[in-house]
Image (tube, rainbow, N blue to C red):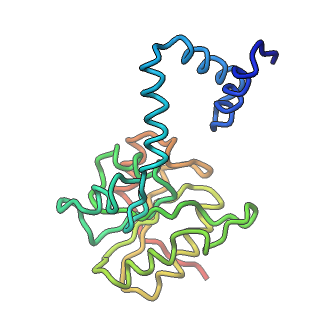
Amino acid sequence: MQFSSRLLEQAVDEFGRLPGVGKKTALRLVLHLLKQPDADVSRFTGSINLLKENIRYCKNCFNIADQDVCEICVSPKRDHETICVVEDTRDVMAIENTNQYQGVYHVLGGLISPMDGVGPSDLKIEALVDRLRNGNIKEVILALSATMEGDTTIFYLSRKLKEFDVQVSTIARGIAFGGELEYVDELTLGRSIATRVPYEVKG
């Protein structure tokens, strides 16, 4: 792709680094911004800067938040005896959109993936163990993607949680193997949460 401006090329390169954004889409976005009023562009770039500078992670569940503790964790309307374990914030949003779950969450920050060099110590697993050790938790729902990495993480967590007197369950597999939660439709995901099943460690 040939550019008439070095500044234009640099902007397109930066947009092209975003996931799912190719060169053509990046160029279209940059050209769109160039046509907008200065105030709109300043508001756009300002919101990104504010996000990066001020965003926090909940000290309880590690979900993205504006305060030290997220709105879900402080809500008296939530069931604080049930923890839904997810990979990242996108999964929290997907489950919240189903309106089928009223407990709290624990965001791992990824999945165990030896091929990618991600081990248990790279995730918020010990923090989850601490929550069970220090709280009155009755159920842990392992709501992880139906992938090899998801299944590996579920197996590891189930062994880790055996020492606690809690029910460990997984979402029902109305989700095809290889499917990631953020792409599952709300009806299927909602039913999977509602019809969750106990997890049994084999072997």
Q: Residue at x 50, y 55 (%)?
A: 88
Q: Which residue is drawn at 46% across and 48% down?
A: 53
Residue 201 drawn above or below residue 123: below
Residue 113 drawn above or below residue 184: below
Find the residue positioned furthest to the bottom. 163
Which of the pair 97/100 is nearer the observer?
Answer: 97
Q: Residue at x 47, y 81 (%)?
A: 161
Q: In which quarter of the image is the C terminus?
A: bottom right
Q: In this view, does 22 lie to the left or right of 174?
A: right
Q: Find residue 82 and report its horizontal and vertical position in percent.
A: 31, 69
Q: Which residue is drawn at 50% across and 76% down?
A: 200
Q: Find residue 74 and report its horizontal and vertical position in percent.
A: 24, 62
Which of the pair 91/172 is nearer the observer?
Answer: 91
Find the residue positioned furthest to the left. 76
The quadrant where residue 81 appears: bottom left
Q: Quadrant of the N terminus?
A: top right
Q: Find residue 73 and report its horizontal and vertical position in percent.
A: 29, 62
Q: In this view, does 41 lie to the left or right of 194?
A: right
Find the residue positioned furthest to the right. 2
The quadrant where residue 197 appears: bottom left
Q: Find residue 12 and report its horizontal and vertical position in percent.
A: 68, 25
